[in-house]
Image (cartoon, rainbow, N blue to C red):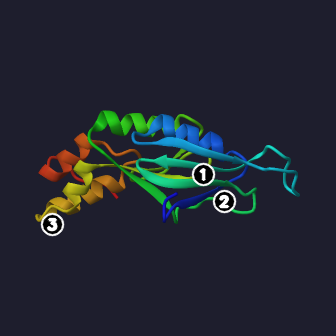
Amino acid sequence: MHKNTICLWYDGDAEDAARFYAATFPDSRVGTVLRAPGDYPAGKEGDVLTVAFTVLGIPCLGLNGGSTFQHSEAFSFQVATEDQAETDRLWQAIVGNGGQASACGWCKDKWGLSWQITPRVLTEALADPDRAAAKRVFDAMMGMVKIDIAGIEKARRGDILGSC
């Protein structure tokens, strides 16, 4: 057991979410599935209570807590991608599996958990010591839904004007 684990609240489908994350992201896996030893007000004996899983090396616990609480953008996983192919694959896995696109590289999975699919090129470009280049990149990013690395590189070079 880890000393610190992120606990994520689900409405009865924590195991499905954990299995999706394990199949989608590297260094991810499903661990112990804890089932109810008896009936309880919100469920029956054998129902999944919690699922221990790792996503991108981060220990998590999926808690089937019911519909009282929902995920929000106040918590998200930020995934650093190496290239456009990885960015596209992860984006499509999340959005194409019942998720929802947002803006600036953000999306939600079908369970409502937010993800930032962030190419390393974007992070590096936003930290460019040439503040005009960083501003062009920022402006270009603000007009994107999924991050387009070629567009980020063009903005950094000054080949295009960003949009806001």
- Badge 1 crowding class, 10 Å Cα cut-off, few under 14, some 14 to 19, many 20 or more, is some
Tell me the CA gap for discs 1 and 2: 7 Å
- Nearest-to-viewer mark from 2 and 3: 2
The secondary element bearing badge 3 is classed as helix
Residue 35 position, x and y percent, is 74, 47
Residue 131 is labelled as: 3
The secondary element bearing badge 1 is classed as loop
Asked whether 137 or 86 is in front, the reply is: 86
Give left or right: position of 149 versus 59. Answer: left
- Badge 3 crowding class, 10 Å Cα cut-off, few under 14, some 14 to 19, many 20 or more, is few
Query: Quadrant of the rendered structure where residue 16 is?
Result: top right
- Residue 110 appears in the picture as rendered: no
Residue 104 position, x and y percent, is 39, 53
Q: Amino acid at mark 3?
A: Arg
Q: Amino acid at mark 2?
A: Gln
Query: Quadrant of the rendered structure where residue 150 is?
Result: top left
Residue 112 is labelled as: 1
- Nearest-to-viewer mark from 1 and 3: 1
In the picture of the structure, the residue carrying the numbered disc 2 is 70
Q: Amino acid at mark 1?
A: Gly
Q: Quadrant of the C terminus?
A: bottom left
Give left or right: position of 137 versus 93. Answer: left
Determine whether label 1 and label 3 are within 8 Å by CB: no
Above or below, comparing residue 95 to residue 67 in the picture: above
